[in-house]
Image: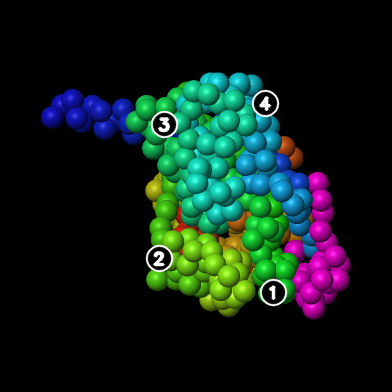
Amino acid sequence: MVMVKDLRMSKETVRTKIIGVGYYVPPKVVTNEDWSKLVDTNDEWIVTRTGIKERRMAEPGVASSDLGKIAAENALENAGMSADQIDLIICATISPDKIFPSTACIIQEKIGAKNAAAFDISAACSGFPFALTIADQFIKTGLYKYILVISAETLTHLVDKQDRSTCVLFGDGSGAAIVTQSTDESGVLGTFMKSDGSYENTLHMPAGGSRLPASHETVDARLHYLTMEGKDVFKTAVYMMRSAAEEALSAAGLTVDDVDLFIPHQANIRIIKAIFTRLKVPDERVLINVDKYGNTSSATTIIGLAEAVEQGRIKKGSIVVLTAFGAGFTWGATVIRW
């Protein structure tokens, strides 16, 4: 009994620290004006409803692993590490290169992480907080020393370019973080994850899996594209992202007032504004980049984190909260002391 108690106490003192971050977005910029030439929309309509002004688009033939490779290499450089030091790669994506093998395995080969295990997770836009929470557990148990957590998405390949309600929302991008055991007070302080599968058909891709494999019928019916019930997603996202942030802060023994920077999922400026108006958080404590990248799904929070570090908005000791919501529905948050 004493041995068990000591083991539990030792785990409670272990924290998972981010020691390197990186991100990458494709060079091609697609503006609202560009979209207005393809579908019945305009800049005012898109900006008013979403806050998006432009997004990045991967060229045909460029896959999520290609973006993830560069983000991973940037994170390795930021951490001053080589790929062969990585023990585990977790890739969050809903736009994998293939159904199998995992995009994580493909990135492993691309970066030369020959000593790593690798797997994907699918939690949609909540992917990075979910993947970081998983990595946190592996670090706390001591099973792995250095973990590379990646989010990589090429959703512009998967949207219906005839559906103006969804095609203008999404962009492509990737981000990565390297985590290890903390040697000081910095690190992950609290996490939260939750899901509700009753919303399965509110935001999904109907075909391409085992229920509706690809066929002439599914292609003709345009079932291999993302579909979304926008109003239901909006009202649910506001509540769930706020709830996730509050739950993770509670787990960390902190409150909203303790947070230096919130990095929410970048789906829609109105969702973001609604959340932080309710939490009474001023704009300067909320990172917003949806205007230039659109919704990059699982990559939004890690791109935001890496940008904030790059811009000096996060400093040693800063309290940062990542909060996200996605298809599933899934929602989650992570509290970090930098």
Q: Disc 3 on helix, strand or loop? A: helix
Q: Are marks 2 and 3 in contact (CB under 8 Å)?
A: no
Specify start and end residues of the magenta stretch as a single range.
27-52
Q: Earlier in the sequence, mark 4 or mark 3?
A: 4
**Identity, as a three-letter code, of the amino acid under mark 1:** Asp
Q: Earlier in the sequence, mark 2 or mark 1?
A: 1
Query: In the rendered image, which residue does mark 2 sit on?
Result: 196
* Left or right of 80, for residue 35: right
- Give the image location of residue 29, x and y in percent: 82, 54
Query: In the rendered image, which residue does mark 4 sit on?
Result: 77
Query: In the rendered image, which residue does mark 1 sit on?
Result: 163
In the rendered image, the quadrant that contains the C terminus is top right
- Give the image location of residue 118, x and y in percent: 48, 35
Question: How many residues crowd mark 4 within 10 Å: few (<14), some (14–19), many (20+)?
Answer: some
User: In percent of the image, x 42 and y 27: which residue is there?
Assistant: 144
Query: In the rendered image, which residue does mark 3 sit on?
Result: 139
Q: Disc 2 on helix, strand or loop? A: loop
